[in-house]
C-alpha cells in the first residue's frame, strides 16, 4: 500500500504503520568547487538527510550554515539548499567520502583511503588558498601519524597537496565535544586568517 509521503505502509494489529520512503544510499552529492577558491570546506561524508535532499549539511541539528554566517564568511544567512552558491563567495564544499551513511562508524578504512586520493586530486586541480577540514576525525584520517594525542583546532603544520590545512570542529549536532561558542570561535579564527 502506498503512503502519502511516498513510502509504503505495513498492516499491523493496531492499524496502518507508515514506513518512510527509502533513501538512495548510492546517491552522491555534487562537489561545489571551482578555481580560485579562498577556502575549501571538507566534510566527512553525507548523512542520510543530505543524501535524501541532495544538499550538503542538511541535517536538522547541523550548525554549518549558521556558523558560516555568524563568522561572517558569507554575507547573508544560508540554508543547505544554498550549498551551490558557496563558490560565489570563494568558498568550496566537498566530502572526503562520497558514500552517505547514518554515522561515521559505518565508514571503512578503504573508504578513507579512496577519499584521500579523491580529495588530493580536487585540491591539486582547484588550488584553494586553504583547506578547512570539518572535524578532527578527518585530520586524523588524512594524517595517520596524528592518531594519538590531542589535535588543536586551527591552522596546522601539515599541508594537503601543497595547501595549508585548517581544522574546524565538526558542526554536526552529534558533536558533543565542542560548544556552539567554541565552534563559532574556530570559524571566526578561520575568517580572520582568511583576511590576511
Image (cartoon, rainbow, N blue to C red):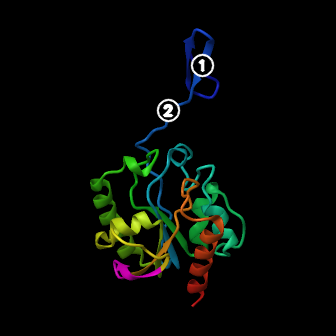
- Extreme-front residue of the structure: 149
15 part of magenta stretch: no
Q: Quadrant of residue 164?
A: bottom left
Look at 54% across and 58% down and name the residue there.
175
- Extreme-right residue of the structure: 76
Look at 31% across and 54% down and name the residue there.
111
Look at 29% across and 59% down and name the residue there.
114
C-alpha separation, residue under disc 1 versus residue under disc 2: 15 Å
| Residue 121 makes an appearance in the image | no
Quadrant of image for the C terminus? bottom right
- Extreme-top residue of the structure: 13
In-front residue for pair 19/117 = 19
The relative height of residue 25 versus residue 72 in the rendered view (above or below) is above
Q: Is residue 164 left or right of residue 168?
A: left
Neighbour class for label 2 at 10 Å: few (<14), some, many (≥20)? few
Closer to the chain start, of discs 1 and 2, is 1
Q: Which residues are magenta?
A: 155-162
Callout 1: helix, strand or loop? strand
161 part of magenta stretch: yes
Position of residue 72 measured from the top left corner of the image (x, y, whole percent): 68, 75
Position of residue 103 measured from the top left corner of the image (x, y, whole percent): 45, 48
Position of residue 15 measured from the top left corner of the image (x, y, whole percent): 63, 11
In-front residue for pair 169/30 = 169
Quadrant of image for the N terminus? top right
Which residue position holds label 1? Answer: 17
Magenta-colored segment: predominant secondary structure:
strand
Residue 22's disc is 2
The relative height of residue 124 versus residue 25 in the rendered view (above or below) is below
Q: Is residue 52 left or right of residue 118?
A: right
Amino acid at each position: 500500500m502506498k503512503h502519502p509521503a511516498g513510502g509504503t505502509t505495513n498492516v499491523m494489529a493496531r492499524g496502518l504503520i507508515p514506513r518512510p520512503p527509502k533513501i538512495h544510499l548510492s546517491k552522491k552529492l555534487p562537489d561545489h568547487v571551482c578555481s580560485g577558491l579562498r577556502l575549501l570546506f571538507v566534510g566527512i561524508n553525507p548523512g542520510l538527510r543530505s543524501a535524501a535532499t541532495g544538499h550538503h549539511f542538511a541535517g536538522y541539528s547541523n550548525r554549518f550554515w549558521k556558523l558560516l554566517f555568524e563568522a561572517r564568511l558569507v554575507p547573508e544567512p544560508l540554508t543547505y539548499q544554498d550549498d551551490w552558491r558557496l563558490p560565489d563567495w570563494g568558498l568550496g564544499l566537498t566530502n572526503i567520502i562520497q558514500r552517505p551513511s547514518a554515522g561515521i562508524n559505518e565508514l571503512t578504512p578503504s573508504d578513507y583511503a579512496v577519499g584521500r586520493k579523491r580529495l588530493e586530486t580536487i585540491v591539486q586541480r582547484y588550488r584553494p588558498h586553504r583547506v578547512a577540514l570539518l572535524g578532527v576525525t578527518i585530520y586524523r584520517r588524512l594524517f595517520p601519524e596524528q592518531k594519538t594525542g590531542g589535535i588543536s583546532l586551527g591552522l596546522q603544520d601539515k599541508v594537503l597537496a601543497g595547501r595549508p590545512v585548517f581544522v574546524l570542529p565538526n558542526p554536526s549536532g552529534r558533536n558533543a565535544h565542542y560548544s556552539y561558542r567554541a565552534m563559532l570561535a574556530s570559524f571566526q579564527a578561520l575568517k580572520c586568517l582568511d583576511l590576511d
